[in-house]
Amino acid sequence: MTTGNRKAIFGWALYDWANSAFATTVMAGFFPLFFKNYWSAGADTAVSTARLGLANSIAGIVLALMAPLLGAIADRGSARKRFLVSFSYLGVVMTVLLCLVSRGNWPLAGLLYILSVIGFSGSNIFYDALLPTVARKSRLDTVSALGYALGYLGGGLLFAFNVWMTLKPATFGFADQSAAIRFSFLTVGVWWALFTIPLLCFVKETRDPGRAAGWVAVRAGIGQMRRTFREIRQLKTVFLFLAAYWLYIDGVDTIVRMAVDYGSSLGFEPEALIKALLMTQFIGFPAALGFGYLGKRIGARRGILIALGGYILITIWGTFLRSSFEFYILAAAIGLVQGGIQALSRSYYTRLIPLERSAEFFGFYNMIGKFAAVLGPLTVGGVTLLVRSLGAESTIAARVGIASIVIFFLAGGALFLASKDRRSNKDQKNRESGSQA
């Protein structure tokens, strides 16, 4: 491997290290707590939960509508790196501005959060698309895994620092925890911006002289998106899997985004919730590797079904939580299956699609991922408000709301079972024949 190639791989992988800080510290960690207790101070817990669910859903809808078209345009116009930078610094600026929002101003906090999530998730579309430009086909798996590994590590390290700063604000010169949390939003923006620089410097996107530009690229991208959509509808197995993936990954992302809000609604201390989230982050990395080994031994399909079964049990168990200790155990259980279901879903999908056109089909896979956490948060928020309006206590309403997520895992699992993995079975038989020979 040449020095330039090593630099490109390192620069590309460091972007996962950079933006994972937003996913851990902001999206899953401090924002849900701060939104409920600071920006929505005085509001009923059911109302603040509905507001947070609406914000997550709006961001998801916008991204889902934009993702396939932007991906096709960027691909046709060789502009993946340019789009990545634009979305990433949109996220950086909006995240930094969160530290300036005053107490009780939940509409502005919600708006900035929506824009920052759009920046974060939008940049990931083009980050994934840049992988083939930095790694040979034989090294795609290892380079992709390097990005995941650095993401878990980088996001976890900064989150651990921010948790320490929040738990011991006086040590860092802050008057209280609120000041420390607001400063943590600034650290995420600086971290994200700083560690994006290696990608800008070392990753060189190949300029194809035959590629389109300007409005020609837009028209070409729209045409490509339409063609791929028509083909996906004709491939029953791929279509069923994408429908199943949409449902169950919506449940996964909803748990990630709403778990801290749920724990807060039950009256658990913010410190306990943050520690549990931090534990999930570090358990997720080795667990993902373990599921990769499991998928190799018993097949990705069975591994996904095991993870789905785990999520169904976790959701049911979660509705009966009584103590912060139980919340820790639940967080550990989530960490065991979270990375695994994501990793195996991507490898399983790879077996179903035409390999010579994987980029186009993965554009729709990314679109489904962006649609995730749209129905889930709306369902949790809507059910919570409905139960609360019927006269139930706020904690009872929160429990019923979180229980509604199990619908997504059951429906997704049913569709997943309905899809037939003929290609995967054929590949397995070929491998067995080869090993016997």
Image (cartoon, helix red, strand yellow):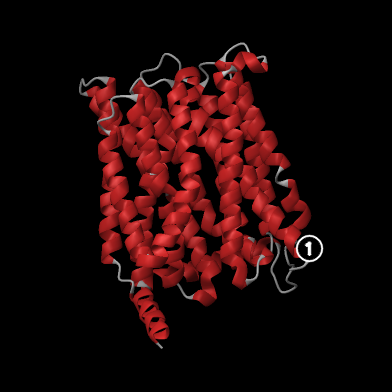
Visible in this render: residue 46? no
Q: Is residue 22 above or below residue 250?
A: above
Q: Judge by depth and name the residue closer to the eye, 84 or 198.
A: 198
Q: The C terminus lies in which quarter of the figure? A: bottom left
Q: Residue at x 42, y 66 (%)?
A: 296
Q: Is residue 266 above or below residue 226?
A: above
Which residue type carries mark 1? Gly
User: Which quadrant of the rendered structure holds the N terminus?
Assistant: bottom right
CA neighbours of label 1 inside 10 A, class few (<14), some (14 to 19), many (20+):
few
Residue at far front of view: 436
Q: How far from the left and from the top, in percent, is residue 19?
A: 61, 43
The total of numbered circles placed on residues is 1
User: Can you tell which quarter of the image residue 109 is in?
Assistant: top right
Q: Which residue is nearer to you in this view: 173 or 234?
A: 173
Residue at 63% x, 45% y is 17
The image shows residue 89, relative to residue 106, as above or below, that is: below
Question: Where residue 207 appears, x then y in whole percent?
Answer: 74, 67
State whether residue 76 appears in this view: yes
Regarding mark 1 in the picture, which secondary structure is present there?
Answer: helix
Measured from the top left, where is residue 55 in percent x and y?
Answer: 46, 34
The image quarter containing residue 98 is: top right
* Depth order, front residue of 349/166: 166
Looking at this rendering, what residue extends furthest in the bottom direction?
437
Q: Is residue 32 left or right of residue 197?
A: left
Which residue position holds label 1? Answer: 4
Residue located at (44% from left, 37% from top): 257
